[in-house]
Image (cartoon, coloured by chain):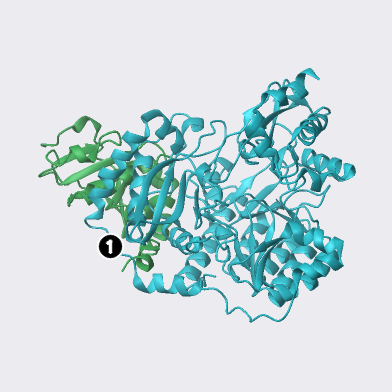
Chain colours: A green, B cyan
Amino acid sequence: MPDVNSTSINLTGIYVTDNGFAAYKALTPIRAVTVEEAPEDLDEVLNGIAEVHISFASPADGRGFSTARCLRDRGYQGRVIAVGGLVCDQYRHARQSGFDGVLISQEQAAKMPERHWLEQANRVAVNYRAQIYA
Amino acid sequence: MYHYQDFDRDFVKDRVSEFRTITQRRIDGVLSEDEYKPFRLQNGLYLQLHAYMLQVAIPYGTLSSRQMHKLADIAERWDKGYGHFTTRQNIQFNWMKLADVGDVLEALSEVDMHAIQTSGNCIRNVTADHFAGCAPDEIEDPRMVAELLRQWSTAHPEFAFLPRKFKIAVSGAPNDRAVIAFHDIGIQIVQNRDGETGYRILIGGGLGRTPLIGQELSAFVPKADLLCYLEAVMHIYNRYGRRDNKYKARIKILVQENGLAQTKAQIDAYFAQIKKTHRPLSETLLRKIKDDFALPNLSKASAFDLEAQMALSPAFARWAGQSVHAHRDENHVSITISLKKQGATPGDASTAQMRVMAELAKAYAYDELRVSHEQNIILPHVPKEHLLAIYQALQEADLAAANIGLVSDIIACPGLDYCSLATARSITIAQQIATHFEGLKTEYDIGPMKIKISGCINACGHHHVGHIGILGLDRAGVENYQITIGGDGTQDAAIGERTGPGFSYEQIIGAIDRIIAHYLAKRTGKDESFLAYYKRVGITPFKEVLYHA
């Protein structure tokens, strides 16, 4: 598998999208982007990358939202997945910041069942941007 | 004032139901306090020393009488019959029961209010000049941009988990009454040489344990670019702000450590990137905001001679002399209602007092009230002919203290009487200072004076910008009060200078008395204010009277 930095990439778990839980199937090649990296430096690196994983160290550390946002601003169009410490209440934030979905472990899934994520998925379309911008 | 649209209303209702669901999980024990905490904070619910405290958002301090009535109802039904107006132009209820909070939020939503983002590491309630829309020196009503910022920052997906809280203040006038230089971002409405209105942006101001004056990030941001520019500021802060130490996590530390030039370069670069694809603001929304904040249809003058009336009644004259402020319309004034009666808790209002203020606004003042960051209530538009009636009603409600801007008009944080972070009492110090000078009958002689008291280093009482600042600390289990002099929260922003070692709870009133007595004895005359005197002589004479007398 021609991913760039595979040691840091988790390839198992449950992939959460607006449709709920599904078994995760990777799109390759994958590149993990850390929140310490500047997306501005990654345009060439991400050329041809099908899927980007951005890891959240904890629910309180919101840097990954800005990383995703910046990648999208720079035109990255592959799949962007949040991994790590997000909780279900943050699903809305992830989707509205440019993520396609969230990859969680079986343990996370047991603690935060699908219906909690779906409840938040219903809030993805609700935001002030529709009212503020033309 | 801004009238909610369906979207605003639906959004708040949804938050209430979400709050109920998740809080029920906490009450049932499914969620631990640790797991529940981030969620309750995003909804303005703090856990204080004795009880839960709910901080209700009052965007830029503007309220209708109906909303004020609802706050009174909440104080009566779910609290102990009073509320506390804060330096963020909000109100907090100090004695909430967790099981009641859902009902309180539901009650608030009935009048288009909520407690969203009054806590947590997010963009907090945007504050603005409490004389917005009526001040004669105003270029433009700052609440129009504050409302836009409210909408933009509410539930912003990228900026809900910042390194630390983020506070924005807006001033629409050259005279700064919104303390913009001590905010994470201060916005001043200005005109450029072509007469175009835009925004001067200050960054990195703040109080707390590292007080810093905001620096100019941009001299002029055009109106159309403001949200995009602030997105860039927040984005850079979210990426680079420190997360290793909560005491170094505010944007002021990022600016201090990296320098203004580097921070500005990062912001400018990101701004250039997102500006290319940033959508323009909705003309419909801008038009609505403009219409909503238009001046009320001001009544034409009937004859009222304020000066003559003041000559007839010395008590009225004394009150009017402090509480009545010039309005941009010559037949109108703005009134500050003091919540600082000598001996009372600064910023507290009882249920009955809230109802009186609401009724006065409805009967005489175009149905509008404001909360000032100085913890008083303002009737922004008052026809002069109603001044006497308002004064009499305020007297009956014990709200006619004639002390606005004077030594007893003190900002004080809740301190050790309520707050879990506090290291010392601040309310009782404020009460004692106020009654001390009332007893001496020197309040009017002393003249303009801003005393600000914080009960811990986090500086919620703004002590750094008090003409006299008092900081209550804990020294080996004993309260100890440090004094600063010369702070200034206006356009002449300055951080107070420390006099030296602190004073005990028993000594602090005497120390403040010596400072004031020295000023009264040595000033050139009544025209030289305390602050002007300090600027002329510096801190040394004050040290003399405090430590060597």
A6 and B546: which one is in front?
A: B546
B328 and B245: which one is in front?
A: B328
Which percent across, then down, holds residue B35? 52, 43
Which percent across, then down, holds residue B457? 62, 32
The chain that hosts pointer 1 is: B
Q: Is residue A5 above or below residue A75?
A: above
Q: Is residue A22 visible?
A: yes
Q: Is residue B510 above or below residue B157?
A: above
Residue A124 in which image quadrant = bottom left
Left or right: B58 as drawn, with respect to B548: left
Residues packed near mark 1 inside 10 Å, few (<14), some (14 to 19) or many (20 plus): few
Q: Residue furthest right?
A: B439
Which percent across, then down, holds residue B165? 49, 43
| Amino acid on which disc 1 is placed | Arg
Give the residue at x 81% y 70%: B309
Q: Which residue is tagged 1?
A: B279
Q: Residue furthest top?
A: B548
